Amino acid sequence: MKILVATDKPFAKVAVDGIRREIETAGYELVLLEKYTEKKQLLDAVRDVDAVIIRSDVIDTEVLDAAKNLKIVVRAGAGYDNVDLDAATAHNICVMNTPGQNANAVAELAIGLMLYAVRNLYNGTSGTELMGKKLGIHAYGNVG
């Protein structure tokens, strides 16, 4: 079984190493397509794979038509907005996502953005210090 990891914005090296280890330990073959710039590269890469792991890459009818052996698309993230679910259903392809998979990164980014805002970094002028202030996080789901 061939599993394609396709992303125009590369995964972190540690993530790719972990994905590679899991796929190869299971006896499957990893096909890696990172930093591609043209859709044709994705179309060529999906031709003979059984599974695809993506991030925000678009999986539409054209991609699904090119993927003759494809059985599953896994979206590394919470949503499906970049995958044509109707076309996948018509091609009898299962689509899955990984909700909560990046919750730690999102929480860290939220804290970083709060500091960015309170310190007024966008304008490059003096911001507010947090000393003596209360800081709270109001969130829902895996991040909250």
Image (tube, rainbow, N blue to C red):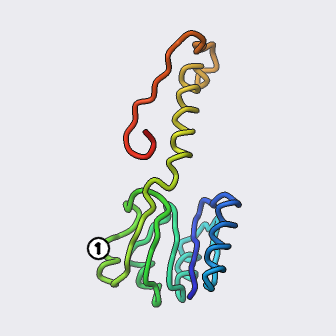
Residue at image position (42%, 78%) is 62
The total of numbered circles placed on residues is 1
In the rendered image, the vertical position of residue 103 relative to residue 111, given as above or below? below
Residue named by callout 1: 86
Residue at image position (35%, 70%) is 84
Quadrant assignment, res 2: bottom right
Quadrant assignment, res 68: bottom left
Quadrant assignment, res 12: bottom right
Image location (x, y in percent) of residue 107: 52, 40
In the rendered image, the vertical position of residue 57 relative to residue 23, given as above or below? above
Q: What residue occupies the far top of the structure in this picture?
A: 132
Q: Secondary structure at mark 1?
A: helix
Image quadrant holding the C terminus, namely top left
Structural crowding at the residue carrying mark 1, measured as other residues with C-alpha within 10 Å and reported as few (<14), some (14–19) or many (≥20): few
Left or right: 125 in relation to 47: right
Image location (x, y in percent) of residue 95: 39, 72
Image quadrant holding the N terminus, namely bottom right
In the rendered image, the vertical position of residue 49 relative to residue 42, given as above or below? below
